[in-house]
C-alpha cells in the first residue's frame, strides 16, 4: 500500500491516563502541546479540541449541543482509557466567546474563569476524575498558562 508520510515518532502503547479539553484554535495548538508535555509532564494525552474548549462543559445554554458530544467523549475516555485527570484550558482571544456567545470583550476573562470552574465541577462529577483548569494568556508573543484555583479543589504540585 502506498503512503504519503511516515512519522519518525514511535508509537507508544502505554496510556498515561490524562486528557485535555481545549479550544480548537490553531493559533495556540503548539503552545498547548508544549505546556502539556513540558509544563505538566504529560508526554501523551487524549485530546478533545472543540471551538471554545471547556465552555461547552460549563452549562451555558448557547453551548448545549456541543456539550452533549463532549460530555460523552469525556465519559468514554474516562471509562475506556482509565483517565485520572482532565486538564481544561481556556485561552485569551477566544472567538467563541465574542462571536458565538456575544460576550463583550471586557467581560470575557471573567466569563472564562466562571466557565472553567463550572466545567471542572462537571468533569469531576460525570467522570470521577481530577479536573485541572488553566487560562492561557498572552504576554507579548508568549503564551502563559495560569492555574485557576476553585472552591473545593486542591492545587496539585504542578499548580502550586
Image (spheres, helix red, strand yellow):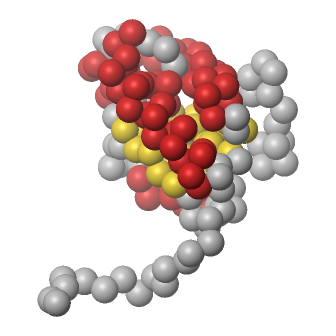
Q: Is residue 42 above or below residue 65?
A: below
Measured along the vertical axis of the image, is residue 132 above or below residue 36? above
Q: Quadrant of residue 131?
A: top right
Residue at point 56%, 52% (across, down) = 80
Q: Quadrant of the C terminus?
A: top right
Outermost left residue? 2
Camera-side residue: 44 or 81?
81
What residue appears at the point 31 percent right and 86 percent down from the top-left corner? 6
Return the x and y of residue 1 as percentages of the image width and height. 16, 90
**Vertical arrangement, residue 31 with respect to residue 73, above or below:** below
Say whether residue 58 is left or right of residue 154.
Answer: left
Report whether 70 appears left or right of 6.
Answer: right
Residue 108 vs residue 9, the one in the foreground: 9
Q: Is residue 116 left or right of residue 101?
A: right
Residue at 75% from the left image edge and 27% from the top image edge: 149
What is the x, y in percent for residue 87? 61, 43
- Which image quadrant is residue 99 in? top left
Q: Position of residue 20 (x, y in %)?
A: 54, 46
Can see residue 98? no
The count of marks equals: 0
Q: Please, which residue is most extreme toward the front here?
A: 80
Q: Is residue 40 visible?
A: yes
The residue depicted at 46 percent of the width and 17 percent of the height is: 108
> Going by the image, does 99 lie left or right of 94?
left
Residue 51 % position (x, y): 34, 34
Amino acid at each position: 500500500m502506498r503512503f504519503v508520510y511516515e512519522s519518525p515518532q514511535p508509537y507508544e502503547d502505554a496510556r498515561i491516563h490524562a486528557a485535555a479539553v481545549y479550544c480548537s484554535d490553531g493559533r495556540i495548538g503548539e503552545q498547548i502541546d508544549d505546556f502539556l508535555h513540558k509544563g505538566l509532564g504529560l508526554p501523551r494525552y487524549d485530546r478533545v479540541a472543540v471551538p471554545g474548549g471547556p465552555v461547552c462543559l460549563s452549562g451555558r445554554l448557547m453551548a448545549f449541543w456541543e456539550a452533549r458530544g463532549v460530555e460523552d467523549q469525556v465519559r468514554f475516555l474516562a471509562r475506556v482509557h482509565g483517565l485520572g485527570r482532565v486538564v481544561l484550558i481556556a485561552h485569551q482571544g477566544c472567538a467563541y466567546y465574542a462571536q458565538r456567545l456575544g460576550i463583550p470583550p471586557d467581560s470575557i476573562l471573567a466569563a472564562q474563569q466562571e466557565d472553567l470552574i463550572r466545567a471542572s465541577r462537571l468533569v469531576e462529577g460525570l467522570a470521577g476524575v481530577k479536573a485541572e483548569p488553566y487560562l492561557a494568556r498572552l504576554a507579548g508573543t508568549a503564551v502563559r498558562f495560569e492555574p485557576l484555583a476553585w472552591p473545593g479543589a486542591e492545587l496539585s504540585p504542578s499548580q502550586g
